[in-house]
Amino acid sequence: MAEQARLRVDGSQLRLSSSRSSGKPRFVEGSIVRIYMENFLTYDVCELRPGPNLNMIIGANGTGKSSIVCAICLGLAGKPSFLGRAEKVSLFVKQGCLKGLVEIELFKVPENIIITREIQVVTNTSTWHINKKLATLKTVEEQVAALNIQVDNLCQFLPQDKVGEFAKMSKIELLEATEKSIGPPEMYQFHCKLKNLKEKERELEIVCKGKVNSLEKMKQRAERYKQDVDRYHECKRHLDLIDMLERKRPWVEYETVRQQHESVKQRRDQAKEELKNLKEKQSPLAKKNQEYEEFSNSLNIKIRNTADEIKDVSQKCKTKQDALEVKDKQISDINQALRMKKDEEMDRKKKIQSAYKMIDEWNYELNTVTECENLQPQIDAVNNELKHVQEERANIDSDIGDVTTEKRNQERENERINDRIGQLNNIIKIKEEALQGRFQDTHSALLWLRKNKHKFKKEVCEPMMLTINVKDNKHAKYIENHISTNDMKAFVFESQEDMELFLLELRDRQKLRVNAVCAPDKSCAETLPSRPIEELHRYGFFSYLRELFDAPVPVMSYLCFQYHVHEVPVGTEKTRNMIERVIKETKLKQIYTAEEKYAIRISMYTKLTISVNTSLRPAQFLNYSVDTDERRQLEKQQQNIKQVLQSLDKQLITLCERQKHLECRDNELRQQKKELLERGSRRKQLESKIAVKYDSIRQLEQNPINLEKESQQAKIKIRAINIQKAKLVTELKCHIKNYISLNIRKADLILQSTAVDAERNRLEAEYKAASIELRASEQRFLELDERKRILTENCKDLMKKARQMCNLSLDQPLPKEFQTAFQTLPNTLEEIDAFLNEERSRVSCFTGLSASVVEECSKQMEEIQKLTEDIEENKKELDNYKQSILKIKEKWLNPLKKMIESINEKFSAFFSSMESVGEVDLHVENEEEYDKYGIRIRVKFHNFTDLHELTPFHQSGGEKSVSTVLYLMALQELNRCPFRVVDEINQGMDPVNERRVFEMFVKTACKESTSQYFLITPKLLQNLTYNEKMTLLFVYNGPYMLEANKWNLKSFCRRRRRLGRVDEQ
């Protein structure tokens, strides 16, 4: 080969070494001459210089091939979204560095363009330089676009993560991408202009159509306006008549009010004369009424004085009567005191008799009581038995206390166990609430299952997130990261028939979104791991996943079968620190460390071990776990406590019955002892009682009452009080006589006053009647006077109003034209109002008319004329658009068809060389809809099939890759872009197609007329055909690579030649 290049990697530092032919390479303007990366993705420092034709970048997976593609895209003002890897540009900076740098040197005459992009991690921003001078992003984009570089065009730039999207491009998108990529600059511009002109043409047609409709409506409206104008003139005549009637009406109204004013003036003068006569008649009555009122007042004074004297005498009588009542009360008190003395003496005698009677009864009982016999032996025997009973009662009380204490302790323990079981049940309830909040349909299915478990033949387990109990909450994250969410909410069945019945009911009938799985027929729950966990302890593993949780047997069997939880070990930070050794020595497929999960597989291409690690998600469902061993132990303890409580209850019943029997025996013995003691002390008690009674009799006999003496003293007191009463009665009699005489005199005065009041009332009635008549007459006069004043003002107002209606001044006479017009009109208000109503009714029939109708009619005609002119102008403009579209269409469509024919010719030739069929044509649904033009790719890879359009779904992955590559190759010779990038397009191809495609790549991309091409691949087939114009870039990495600053291509070549000469010698 005339040119070779090797890309070496030492850890993360790369440097390109190359040997080129002496001829100067031919670059197309805009081709990439140099790429420099610093702290970018996997690289610390890397610089490479690609060739002008086909550049093959080869290296194993993960060495940094696609990083070069990312550098090209981002270094030429591309967005991270074009690559499909990350949204932020800062994520492309090497981990641990604060900034990264990408520098792209593009070929241009007379001087190359160097674009530098410095990426800041903290602010996620970029700084741009062009030829070492600070520039803006917009300036960079303009420079890149001027060189026809389109990193967002999949026909030019196809990164690894976007390969699948090429087949997903619609026909329209593919046409636009092809126009931008290989068409002349004006082709895409013509296409965009056609779409814009067509859109404007549509809008103008809609405007014209709207204006034509508006013109038709305006013409119809003008016809209606003409009729309205005629009706308006007729309405005007009626309005003029109404105006004249309204002018005459105030004059007629004025004359009517003036006649009323003259009538009211005459009546007011008559009322004034009547009022004068009534005032002259009323004066004598007032004088006479005054005299009677003075006489009545003097009589009332005498009556009040007499009444005061009567009141004084009455008060004296009452005083004497009160004194007599006091004396009667004193006599009653004396008699009452005497009766009480007699009752007291009688009661004393009865008590003495009763005491003697009781003494006789006690003497009789004393004579019958014998001498006190010896009762002490009987009392001692009762005391001994009583002591024995009390000791036995104390023992039983102690036993009852012990049993009660034990029962209370057992009950407290039972309450503690119940509380703990309640806490465990609350945890289950929390898990069910979490299930309901996240998966409502699964929770509904759970409720249905609990009600219908009888319908299933074998055991059905509730969702795994409820039945799995993690022994330690900190291990929940391993289980949840290992088991998928769909299985976490799945029901587990032992019978396939039960599962089908469950899904038929809930999915098909109730339309619930539920998951169900079936445990294997042969249980795997107890399957042993392939190696004991003790063998893995040295790597930091402490347990397999299965040992971290409990679950029902069907659930555990399914997890062992499906997820191999018995084979997946869980390690610690120690495992993470020695992960490379663990992967190499244990050959495990899945590993968990403290915070990460590792999945290990063998590469299909290199047969090397590849590991993928992901951070563990925090647990969401299994944070709350129930210790099933603890729950079983608690239920067993609860059963034992129940049995112990039953035994203690039986003991308590037996002890209480014995206690009750001993208590009855104790009461009997105490009663016996009491009776024996009472028999010894009865005689002494009787003698003591008799002595006490004799003392009481002596006290009663020492204090007798002398009733005769008390009776004499009472009579003397009563006689003295009766003398005082006789004196009071004499004084009361004198007061009563005086009271009667005063009442007679008061009655005479009242009769005189009544006669005077009657006469005065008669005079007052006459005076009042005269006053009423006077006031009525005065009121009538005032009303007439006010009426006259109001009519006077009304006359003035009506005259003023009438003159205003006719536009006359105060001294100006009524013009003759008004007099002539008024003579033809009615002369009364009723007739005028009737005539007005009739005319107004006629005017009201002319609805919707106004003085502006004539003006609007004229304006409407002007608008019709203007709109007609606008329509003519729009039609001319529309014709101009159509002419422009035809001209541009001819300039755009003919070259486009030729271009697509050229693409189709090359595309078909490529497919023919691969013994397949492929076509490219211009897809048109409607020739006038330029926004729906597209390129259709149709392919056939097998003789027994027809041509099918290339879609994301119909062809296989390899077929889509081949179709994509061949289409891009068909564009290569027609391409006007300076370079093209394709990343790992051969991954899905079989060896035959890959070899054919590679040969086409070499043949097409190594022609003189083609632009620069980058092909990235992790591997190549053996014995491929190469070309001298190819440039091969090998990407190596490993611990024995030279550092970038120590790599020297010339010294390497010299050393290689020297060693070759030594070998020849």
Image (cartoon, helix red, strand yellow):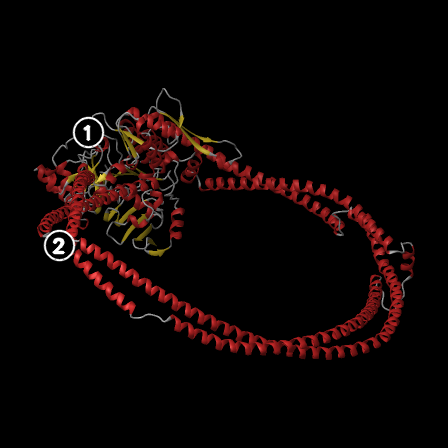
In the rendering, at what x and y percent does residue 538 appear? 10, 42
Q: Residue at x 54, y 40 (%)?
A: 199
Q: Is residue 126 above or below residue 320?
A: above
Q: Identify residue for label 2.
A: 371
Above-or-below relation of 824 to 647 = below
Q: Badge 1: how crowded within 10 Å, few (<14), some, or many (20+)?
A: many
Left or right of 946 on screen, residue 847: right
Q: Quadrant of the C terminus?
A: top left
- Residue 647, given in percent of the width and then of the height, sits at 17, 39
Query: Image check: 439 left or right of 755?
Result: left
Identity, as a three-letter code, of the amino acid under mark 1 = Cys
Indicate the amino acid at tag 2. Glu
The residue under the point 46% across, 31% down is 923
Instruction: Give the tally of numbered discs.
Output: 2
Q: CA distance from mark 2 to mark 1?
A: 103 Å
Q: Nearer the viewer, residue 808 or 680?
A: 680
Closer-to-camera residue (772/33): 772
**Viewer-closest of 733 and 605:** 733
Q: Is residue 496 above or below residue 747?
A: above
Please say if the residues under marks 2 and 1 sit with CB atoms less than 8 Å apart: no
Can you give x and y, in whole percent of width and height, for residue 131 in the image? 33, 54
Q: Which residue is mark 1?
A: 524
Q: Quadrant of the N terminus?
A: top left
Q: Quadrant of residue 164?
A: top left
Q: Which mark is residue 395?
A: none
